[in-house]
Amino acid sequence: MNTNKIYDRITNIIIEMLENHKQNNFNQSWISLSGDSIFAKNAVSKHVYSGINQLLLNYLKRKYRYVFNSWMTFKQLSGLCGRIKKGSKASMVVYKSVLYLEKKTDRNITKLVEHLLKNKQNTEHLDYRKIGYMKQYLVFNISQIDNLPDEYYKIKDLEKLTEFEKDKRAESLINNTGANIEYAPQNSAYYSPVEDKIYLPTRKQFKSKGDFLNVAAHELGHWSGHKSRLNRSLGNEYGSSGYGFEELICEINAAFICAYLGYENKITDNVDYIDNWLSVMKNDKQFVVLASSQAQKACDYIMSFSKVEEAVI
């Protein structure tokens, strides 16, 4: 499958997810805190998928009501003598790769360049151009596979944090960033790039601790994009694709952070935001993939200040 078709397929799944969210009275979450793992992971290597793969696999897990959030490739399940259940369809995991082509001849010299780079050798004598592209591989959920060793069907209880533990970890995550946050009685929350300051309502104004953390994590997402940090484009006009892109980054970032801390984060019920994302996605197939990648960077950056170590890799 070529890169454009991969982007098409990813985008169509996320569009379906957002459309279902609207139809189901805005009650869907980005990541479901159920099953045997908060985050989708490979059942054999224990690798935790990142970025767009978390959204895709978590949505498909919920859509098909899989019990597990563990996945494996055909090669892995075959090596364990597993059998795919009749009618089961594989799910896609994507990653970025690079081609190195000679400028004059367009000859593929990827293996040569990668060998030199891997061995920290000089590549200046080669006149080449670098082309990024998307690759995919297929995985099956454990619920789709029979005959695996018993250990793969054991449902491990998710770590259930007490409210005190949740609070402690959340407070630590927020405070350790060193972000300038002002709490005041108000009905809006926002980040000011000019002041490099976050404005939040008082905590008692929120219906729950989860609601507060969701908003705080979202605004910390904007804070991470400051020119002195991850240097994203901030201050775009409301309703523009740039504005929607930044909001999507911060929504997904908040979902990742909330999940780490044991809170489920619902997709926004702001119809203007969702309609903006859907409109852009239908014309820009890279939109949601790039936003998810930036959200992962924002999440990793924010969490790097604290002792939360369960980063998606």
Image (cartoon, grey):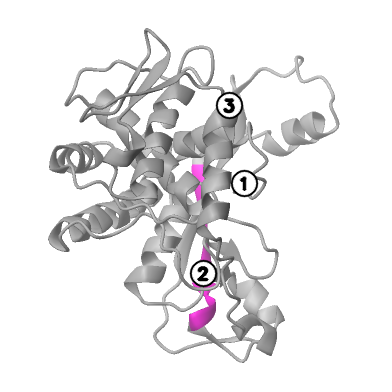
Snapshot quadrant of residue 189: top left
The residue that label 2 is drawn on is 69
Of labels 2 and 3, earlier in sequence is 2
Q: Residue, x 33% and y 46% (percent of image)?
A: 211
Note whether 212 is above or below 25 in the view shown: above
Judged from the image, the secondary structure of the residue bearing numbered disc 3 is strand
Q: Amino acid at mark 2?
A: Asn
- Residue 27 image offset from top left, x and y in percent: 24, 60
The residue positioned 60% from the left and 56% from the top of the image is 48
State the extent of the magenta-drawn residues as a range.
Answer: 134-143
Instruction: Identify the main secondary structure in magenta.
Output: strand
Q: Nearer the viewer, residue 76 or 21?
A: 21
Mark nearest the camera among 3 and 1 is 1
Type of amino acid at the residue the image marks with label 3: Lys
Q: Residue at x 26, y 27 (%)?
A: 185
The answer to whether 277 is drawn above or below residue 49 in the figure is above
For marks 3 and 1, the one nearer the N-term is: 3
Dot 1: element: loop
Q: Which residue is mark 1?
A: 311
How many angstroms separate mark 3 from mark 1 (CA)?
A: 29 Å
Q: Is residue 297 visible in the rendered structure shown here?
A: no
| Residue 239 in view here | yes
Report the residue at 44% width, 62% height from top: 57
Circles 3 and 1: CB atoms closer than 8 Å: no
Judging depth in this view, the residue of 84 and 159 nearest the camera is 159
SS at mark 2 in the image: loop
Q: What is the total number of numbered labels drawn onto the structure image?
A: 3
The spot of residue 310 in percent (x, y) is: 64, 50
| Residue indicated by mark 3 | 130
